[in-house]
Amino acid sequence: MLNGILVFAASPDTIVKKEYYKNGQIRIEVPYVEEKKNGVVKEYYENGQIRKETPYDDNVINGVVLEYYPDGALQCETVYMNGIAGMKTFYRRRIR
């Protein structure tokens, strides 16, 4: 690991770049195919919970971006089509 960054090669043209917080928890995972973001980029809170999931096709956001509260509950969804944001839906937190 160099400066909290690891790169895993699944094949010569496919890699996953991972960055970590100083506490060792993962901060972000970015899949690349032929040097372009392809697949779901996952960002995490320092506590290890997922913060955001962003789908990419050839470096362009395409699909539903999901954002989460620090406790893991869904906060909002944003629909993207060819990099352009469309409908955004927010969710209330349930109080227990």
Image (cartoon, rainbow, N blue to C red):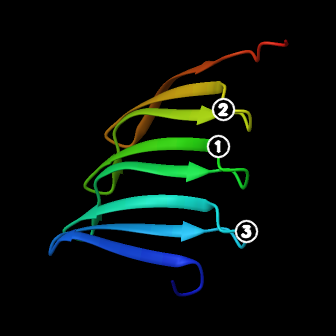
**Residue projecting furthest to the left:** 12
Which amino acid type is marked by label 3? Asn
Residue at mark 1: 49
Disc on the earlier residue, 1 or 2: 1
Between 55 and 24, which is closer to the camera in this rendering? 24
Quarter of the rendering containing residue 33: bottom left
Residue at mark 2: 72
Query: Which numbered mark, 3 or 2, is in the foreground of this view?
Result: 3
Q: Are marks 1 and 2 in contact (CB under 8 Å)?
A: yes
Give residue 81's position: percent from left, percent from top.
34, 33
Which amino acid type is marked by label 2? Gly
Q: Is residue 94 above or below residue 4?
A: above
Give residue 83's position: percent from left, percent from top.
38, 43
Q: Which residue is drawn at 60% across and 60% down?
A: 27
Residue at mark 3: 23
Disc on the earlier residue, 3 or 2: 3
Q: Residue at x 33, y 72 (%)?
A: 8
Quarter of the rendering containing residue 3: bottom right
Q: Which residue is drawn at 51% across and 77% down?
A: 5
Label 3 neighbour load within 10 Å: few <14, some 14-19, many 20+: few
Quadrant of the frame with the C terminus = top right
Label 2 neighbour load within 10 Å: few <14, some 14-19, many 20+: some
